[in-house]
Image: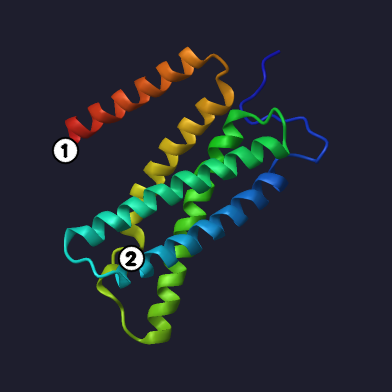
Amino acid sequence: MSKEILDHTGDSGGPAGPIGRTVLITGFILGALLLGSGYLIEALPFEGHWVSQLRVGAMLFLLWLLINTGLRTSEKLMKGLEVGWLFIAGMGIGLAGHLVQSLGFWAVAKYTGAMDTWMAGVGVSLLAPVLAVSLMVTTLTVITLRVKRKLVANGLRLLLFALLAFLIYYFM
């Protein structure tokens, strides 16, 4: 009998409860940190492309840190959690963080009455990059959590980065 990808036999009544709470809490923290880092970077005395590079770097670091932390927390809360739930949780954290950040930008713009130029692109236009980075971080974290042999894990990571480099080269 094979296990399904989302099966989990735990005593907590199913994985949706602890994972859902982890996704919501981590997503809220991610959104708040992304919102705060956006305003902090905007206040720095840098100009031009440095500001956008700092913003992207902060976004990538915070996505990596909080998705990795959320998935490790989910794994510790529910030992033997299926891989499908880890992918759902990782993508959910990225989506929840982006939604909280967008709502924060909207609330600030509504309160101040002025929409900053860098706030205009946060909504739907950044959803695809956030989800792509979330998928990449989730895949790397799942490889780290589930593949026990170090050589196989490193090979899978190398294969993933080679695929990413090929896709960037091919589509850019």
Q: Which amino acid type corresponds to the residue marked 2 in the rendered image?
A: Ile
User: Where is the C terminus found, in terms of image quarters?
Assistant: top left
List x then y, in percent, for residue 84.
58, 32
Give how far apart the Cα atoms at labels 2 and 1 are.
Answer: 28 Å
Q: Which residue is mark 1?
A: 172
Q: Nearer the viewer, residue 106 or 42?
A: 42
Left or right of 96 on screen, residue 128? left
Left or right of 39 on screen, residue 23? right
Residue that appears at 25% across and 54% down: 53
Query: Is residue 166 depicted above or below 20 in this figure?
Result: above
Query: Is residue 108 depicted above or below 92 in this figure?
Result: below
| SS assignment at label 1 | loop
Q: Which residue is mark 2?
A: 41
For this orientation, the residue located farthest to the right is 11
Indicate the quadrant where residue 11 lies: top right
Please state which of the two labelled residues, at mark 2 or mark 1, is closer to the viewer: 2
List x then y, in percent, for residue 77.
72, 39
Residue that appears at 62% across and 56% down: 25
